[in-house]
Every structure is written in structure tokens, then in C-alpha cells.
Amino acid sequence: MNSIQQALRKHASKNRKAANERFFKMGEGEYSAHDTFIGVSMPDLRMVAANFSDVTYELIKETLYSNIHEDRACALIILVNRYKEGSKQDRKAVVEFYLKHKNQINNWDLVDVSAPYIIGQYVLDNPKERPILDKLVVSKDMWQRRIAIVATLTLNRAGKIKEILNLSEKLFDDTEDLTHKAVGWMLREAWKQDAPAVERFIKKHYDRIPRTTLRYAIERMEESKRKKFLQWKIKKR
């Protein structure tokens, strides 16, 4: 057990562990069936990560390859912090490390705590690197597809909604409900920036958009408009 793991275990809670095991789907064949929790809260994860900001990539890798969920989460938060605080060269190194070891980013919260702040920010800062998203979104791994989608959170908030519109079309036929939710979430974030554009997009593709995606995408609309979209009382444009 390395120093990061030892620090995390000082904050482990049986009550938190039980809560996590109830919250994440851990039944046979479900998305967290492979996972093990020790019960560390997000504030404590962030505190521990801040205390290990200067560790080697070897130590981060060792922690990321742990079978303990909170270990992997902490390793990813360390990477996020390093990206935020690093030079251009440091940031490129973080992205390369992240993509090389992306198979260890294997639950929805691990994606959500890291993808927007590493991959999303990198693509925003370096538009020529957008093929990273194109490659991830067609992966056979559901978590890598989620990385592509959730990374657009940073782009959406910067008013760059084109990427989520392009990526969404590739995932309408995805078989995973978690993917449909992620797409809907990001469409909703894009709608906050450019409602007319997203509404036109939904109308254009409404016969293909999964119901879950639609519900998430239109969640913040005014009630009357939201009901029209839910009841398919919209004209295709």
C-alpha cells in the first residue's frame, strides 16, 4: 500500500462505504460489479489529492491501477490538479498519461471528475486536438465514449457547442442508458448557451433521439415547451 492509499484509508468510513455500495449499481452484470469501495467522501478525496500534488507519475499509476474505487478517483483528481497548475508541457504530459491509462477510468463518476478538466480543457485550448474526441466516441468501451461526451462540458460552457452536436449523432443508437443520460446532460448544457441551435438540433433528429436523452436535454425548458417536446408536438425543421 503506497502513501496515497494510506492517507485515504485514514478517512474511510463504514457508513460512507455502505452508502456508496447502495448508490452505485454493484449487482452481477451491472456497471459497478467490478468495483470495491472503502468509503471516502469527495471533500476528503480532494484534500488528500491536494497533499500529493508533486508525486511521481509512477505513484499516480500505481494508485490508478488499484481495485479500490476511491484510490482511482484520487489519482484522477491529482491529474486534474496537475493539469490546472501545470505549464503547456506539463498539460500535454497529463493528457498523454490520461489517454494511455484510460481503461482504468471505469465508472461514471471517475469520468465526470476528470474528463472535462483534462480532455475537455485540452481540446478547448488546442482545437486541432479534437480528433481525440472522435476516437473516444466510437470506442467499444462505454466509459471511453462517456469521456468523449462529458469532456464537452468545458467546451459547452465556453460557448463551443458544435462538438456535442457532432458527437451526439454518433451515440443515438448506443445501447447504454448511462450514455444516453450523458448525451442529454451535455445537450442541456449546450442549450444553456444557445437554446435555438440545440432546439433545432433536437427537432431535426427527434425521431432518432433516445427518450432518456430527450428528457435530460429539455429538463430546463419552460413547462409548456418541454411538454410539446415530450409529446412530439414539434415540427421537423
Image: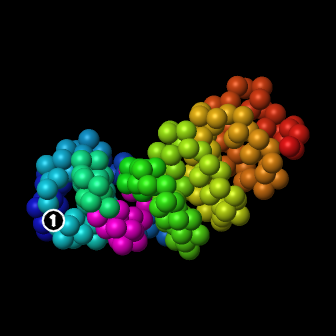
**In the rendered image, is residue 72 in sight?**
no
Q: Nearer the viewer, residue 51 or 44?
A: 51
Q: Is residue 78 magenta?
A: no
Determine whether 53 is above or below 104 in the image. above
User: Residue 31: x percent and y percent?
Assistant: 49, 64
Q: Mark 1 points at which residue?
A: 56
**Residue at 78% from the left image edge and 56% from the top image edge:** 208
Element under disc 1: loop
Image quarter hosting the C terminus:
top right
**Residue at 50% from the left image edge and 46% from the top image edge:** 155
Quadrant of the rendered image containing residue 228: top right
Query: Mark 1, residues whose alpha carbon is within 10 Å: few (<14), some, or many (≥20)?
Result: few
Quadrant of the rendered image containing residue 233: top right
User: Residue 184: x percent and y percent?
Assistant: 62, 47
User: Residue 12: x percent and y percent?
Assistant: 21, 51
Determine whether 51 is above or below 64 in the image. above
**In the rendered image, is residue 221 in sight?**
yes
**Residue at 14% from the left image edge and 60% from the top image edge:** 55
Side of 2 where 222 appears, left or right: right
The stretch of residues the image draws in magenta is 93-113
